[in-house]
Amino acid sequence: MKISKIALKNKSLLVNKCLINGKWVGSKKTFKVHNPSTGDLIAEIPDLGKKETSAAIDAAEKAFYLWSKVPAIERSKILKNWHKLVVENADDIAKILTTEQGKPLSDAKGEMNYAISFIEWFAEEAKRIYGDIMPDPIKNKRLMALKQPVGVCAAITPWNFPAAMITRKCAPGFAAGCTFVIKPAEQTPLTAIALVKLAEDAGFPKGVINIVTSLEPEEIGAEITSNIKIRKISFTGSTEVGRILMKQSAPTLKKLSLELGGCAPFIVFEDANLDHAVQGLMLGKFRNGGQACVSPNRIYVQEKIYNTFVKKFVIEVKKLVVGDGMAAKSTMGPLIDERAILKVQDHIKDAVKKGATVETGGKPHKLGGNFFEPTVLSNVTKKMKCASEETFGPLAPFIKFKTEQEVIAYANSTDFGLASYFFSKDIARIWRVAEAIESGMVGVNTGLYANSGAHLPFGGVKQSGFGREGSRYGIDDYLEIKALSFGNIE
């Protein structure tokens, strides 16, 4: 089997071990990580289980009692050290990310900038965890509210954004005084391990950050959800897995942050700037090959401009260059695996069978492997799978609508509510639609909400989960409020 070699300036970043209680550990049992572009072997990674996960949790609990007592200013300094090291090594981590995940190197570098922003942001927020003093109606009493770290946390991260999801979860937790056990996706563990290596170099005490990898995530997940020492879980992934984690966590009443599936609507009204809307859709739809929970999944275009908009969009889609993420000209890489290919094919087949038209693409790419042609479907109806299920691939289905009221009903006709997008010049309409759409995030005249940076809150409603990551709200889920009542002051 061919081996993918990654040319790194800092070769120490490419680690095939896990960090538990300050020690890098391996395992006789391993699993292979492959390059989705070539199928080549990248590395063999420890296939850990319940025993190692329990040890990591024990280490995190022991470290918590020390880390939580470290003054906020000192935690901030260590986070800033981590930020500095990640900035210095960002290009190398981007190469690791592209090699194991597939996205073009330019996109991987963009993800690194996004990931870095969370470390910088929460390094500052560590010093701004304020409580309150409240007036008491009873004479000679005082009331106070303190904010304290929730405890040992688990971060379970996905393969599509393996760098950003680590920092978006861990940076606020570290700032609050929490410790972590990280379980990265089995497809992309190397990016996560590289970030953990730099965190160790930055000066995090042993046990504060631990990482466990496995080809059988169910075993690690079961230990995380059942272990009473874990006080909070932050998970990004499918709604189906989110439900399982929530059910398994019920006996121990853990605090949960769940960022789950989406089925984002993208609406173009007839008064919109069409060229601007086309570019917004291109950015949102084909970033990471459509493998993003906030990717536009249902595209609604008002009937008067429908044909014109579809034609303009198809012209831009045909300019995409599909190829290996390391190739300078590539603007869209492969899908993560064969299962992802099969789902896109199933949605296209279902739509065509029910009357949709393939405007461009529609089949696996001539490059073979996990590559698929960017695809545009017109004449799509709400009865088709692609109009109600998350495709998670490079498929853009176009649906015609007549009125504002009608399209709002279409947009909200889903159990999901993560992201949504619409384009219009009408200020009154902008406010009406933004308030009426049922989603945690709304992009108005933009197709790229998620990469805006750490200062914006990220999260959904309905079955897209709950909790918010990023922004000043992002640290709240890692804090508990303790009320103090003082008597006999005078």
Image (cartoon, grey):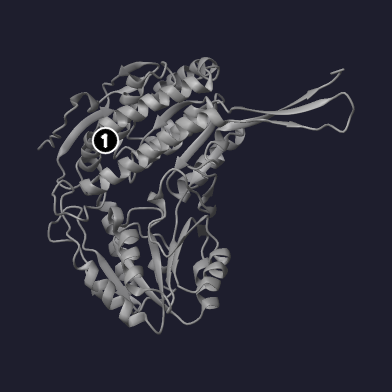
For the C terminus, the quadrant is top right
Which residue is located at x 49 percent, y 74 percent? 426
The residue that disc 1 covers is 90
Question: Nearest the camera: 437 or 78?
Answer: 78
Which residue is located at x 45 percent, y 56 percent? 262
> As shown in the figure, which amino acid type bears the numbered disc 1?
Ala
- Residue 408 drawn at (x, y percent): 53, 71
Q: Is residue 444 left or right of residue 102?
A: right
Which residue is located at x 26 percent, y 44 percent? 108
Relative to 37, does residue 368 appear above or below in the rendering? Answer: below
The image quadrant that residue 12 belongs to is top left
The image quadrant that residue 301 belongs to is bottom left
- Residue 471 drawn at (x, y percent): 50, 43
Q: Is residue 306 left or right of residue 419?
A: left
Question: Nearest the camera: 131 or 8?
Answer: 131
- Residue 115 drawn at (x, y percent): 36, 39
The image quadrant that residue 448 belongs to is bottom left
